[in-house]
Image (cartoon, grey):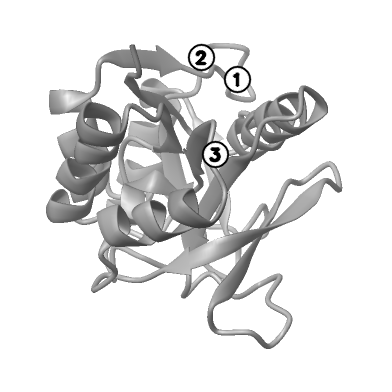
Amino acid sequence: MASLYFYYSAMNAGKTTTLLQAAYNYRERGMEPFLLAPQFDNRFAEGNAEQAWIASRIGLKSPAAAFNGESDLFALVTQAHQRQPLACVLVDEAQFLSQTQVWALSDVVDQLNIPVLCYGLRTDAFGQPFLGSQTLLAIADHLEEIKTVCDCGRKATMVARLDAEGRAVKAGEQIAIGGNDRYLSLCRKHYKEMVKAIED
């Protein structure tokens, strides 16, 4: 029986590496995974609007089907499944899914009997839940935290967005694409201290 999975963490925990390893494992056994990634994260794009790239910090990467806020994910997966039977669907940056898209992925599980594995952040840089993650936390069959650590050695559960001087940014757009130069994973204690330093 297929299930909907949500693997969540702070940044730099290896979510994308884990996703790409899962894709490799399926392909090695002759099974076809279907990879999905947000269209607006074009850091690794190669000019095709229909295609995205999933790339990990350790150098692994793979092409993926691109989605945006208007994408009908059930139709997209159904069409791919008709072309070639799919063993699973792997979604990178799942926090950027809409509520409707998360429910559509649950239809992939329940109607097409295809496992869906979503990987993403739980909260944004301001400590607020992403809508996609919030919906996955509510309806996924399986939840699993992928752990990473703060500089102090505690588990990092928060992400701070940094300005050009390396100070925490307290307000702004929820979505701002970036990597290690722009974000820092912290435990809750040090996240609060970093944010409070802005106010002092």
Local crowd size for mark 1, using a 10 Å CA cut-off: few (<14), some (14–19), many (≥20): some
Of discs 3 and 1, which sits in the foreground? 3
Whole-percent x and y of residue 107?
A: 20, 38
Q: Earlier in the sequence, mark 3 or mark 1?
A: 3
**Viewer-closest of 162 and 105:** 105
Q: Is residue 43 left or right of residue 130?
A: right
Under mark 1, the amino acid is Val
Label annotation for residue 53: none
105 in relation to 99, above or below? above
Label annotation for residue 11: 3
Q: Residue at image x 70%, y 37%?
A: 20
* Image marks 2 and 1: residues in contact by CB distance under 8 Å: yes
Local crowd size for mark 2, using a 10 Å CA cut-off: few (<14), some (14–19), many (≥20): some
Q: Which of marks 2 and 1 is nearer the N terminus?
A: 1
Whole-percent x and y of residue 106?
A: 22, 35
Q: Residue at image x 63%, y 84%?
A: 48
Q: Mark 1 points at which residue?
A: 149
- Could you give the CA–CA distance between mark 3 and mark 1, rounded to whole angstroms? 10 Å
Q: Is residue 85 left or right of residue 75?
A: right
Q: In which quarter of the image is the N terminus?
A: top left
